[in-house]
Image (cartoon, rainbow, N blue to C red):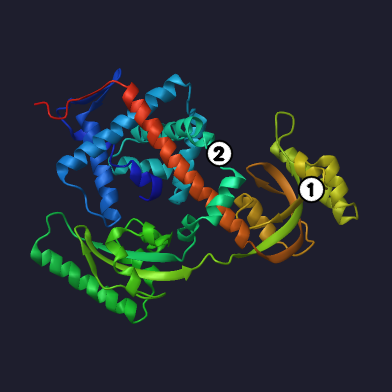
Amino acid sequence: MLGLLSLFLFQTLAYAYVPLDRIIAVVNEDVIMQSELEAKMRTVRGQIKQQGSTVPPASIFERQVLDNLVQNRIQLQLAIRAGIRVDDESLNRTIGNIAAENQVSLTQFREILEKDGYSYEQFREDIRNEITLSQLRKRQVENRIVVTEREIDNFLANQEFQGTFQTEIRLSHILLSLPDAATTDEIDQVRQVAAQIREDLIAGADFTEIAATVSDGGNASNGGDLGWRKIEDIPSLFADYIPEMKNGDISELIQSPSGFHIIKISDVKSDQENIVEQTRARHILIKPDQLVTSEQAKAKLEQLKFRMDNGDDFGLLAKGNSHDSVSAIDGGNLGWRSPGELVPEFQREMDSLELNEISEPFRSSFGWHIVQVLERRSFDNTESVKRGKARAAIRNRKLKEAMQNWTRRLRDEAYVEYRLDDI
């Protein structure tokens, strides 16, 4: 399983296989059990190995994971006191999205979990806790971070800005994993297979197809794509090899405790210039509610489109009928929009239209729409991108400091008793 699923799969297994459990930490009025710690350690250890990194020494690693569990438990207790609740409808929607990302139905998803020996109910609670913590952190910390235009101006004028905009690299990755406690012969066998794969890649074999077929890495189903990375975000295991590589190059074999890695620089880009294809469109939105069903909303738009096809003005009909009060004032005009600014369903429909073409009614998370494309253009968005990245850099720095202070304060105010070393 992939993505968010992999964060939680190991956690439920511990409950079935730990015959003797014990308390290893007291957190205010709550406790953390040995089984929880061991399950979390397995999860984190798996993530570290997938990233090609080295797991810290056992005693240090155990304490780090326990500290993280304590921190999360304190925050969950605060969330309860703050009245943060994740209802079943929201939880089901999130789990449904996870299933969709893995290209299975919710029923199939549950069957896969149970077949692999994992408790679906425990998985639900793990997801609920993750959502709860996210909402708490947004409310207590993230939503309070403010970045002013003056701060952005100063940042852009400062030398600190020079390190923010740089070349980004898109990496692809293949991992041939080693079994636990691999023997010399097993290591040699895997090395030989990896060497042959590397030769095939250099000879022109498709990296994406081979990664999807043979790689044991977490991104195998995506053809080994690790996405766009700045140099400082590249895993340390690979960082030493990148300076000697060019776009399209295949690395030599890279060995780590988890196995043999092969990386490829799939693409390179610089953000010194950012040209985007923008679209100017207008739309009419009808939102289903207690008085208007989804079918009625769609039928209303079909009637409006029929009138437009017979000569009625789009802008006038938008002013009189659209539930998007902001754009309706301007005849449904959405202004110039760059890719990614609109919800995916709207973006796909808009991109499929010819100039001046009016779509059939379609649905997004906001309701039912019809859209008309008025113009398209290539636009130099470099300045906006720079300011956006500067804003993000400032916000991330502030957020990191605020989160550290907030976490430290919660920890100082909590009663925590460690029993990790008790016999």
From the viewer's side, name the closer residue of 20 and 400: 400
Locate residue 244 relative to residue 139 in the image: left or right.
left
> What residue do we see at 34% from left, 32% from top?
122
> What residue do we see at 43% from left, 66% from top?
169
Instruction: Estimate the x, y position of residue 324 in percent, counting from the top left.
Output: 75, 41
Label 1 secondary element? loop
Locate residue 322 relative to residue 258 in the image: left or right.
right
Instruction: Estimate the x, y position of residue 99 in percent, counting from the top left.
Output: 44, 45
Give yes or no for contact between labels 1 and 2 (Cβ–Cβ under 8 Å): no
Q: Is residue 352 visible?
A: no
> What is the spatial separation of the Cα atoms under label 1 and label 2, in whole angstroms?
31 Å
Q: Looking at the picture, which amino acid does disc 2 mark?
A: Val
Q: Is residue 188 visible?
A: yes
> What residue do we see at 53% from left, 52% from top?
155
Q: Earlier in the sequence, mark 1 or mark 2?
A: 2
Q: Looking at the picture, which amino acid does disc 1 mark?
A: Gly
Instruction: Estimate the x, y position of residue 29 in percent, counting from the top left.
Output: 30, 17
Label 2 secondary element? loop
Label tally: 2
Q: Place residue 174 in its image quadrant.
A: bottom left
Q: Is residue 218 above or below residue 172?
A: above
Badge nearest the viewer, 1 or 2:
2
In the rendered structure, find residue 332 and report the number of the disc placed on it.
Answer: 1
The residue at the far bottom in this view is 203
Residue indicated by mark 2: 146
> What residue do we see at 24% from left, 41% from top?
41
From the viewer's side, name the closer residue of 48 and 178: 48
- Which quadrant does the C terminus fall into? top left
The residue at the far top in this view is 29
The residue at the far right in this view is 311
Local packing at callout 2 (Cα closer than 10 Å; few below 14, some 14-19, many 20+) is: few
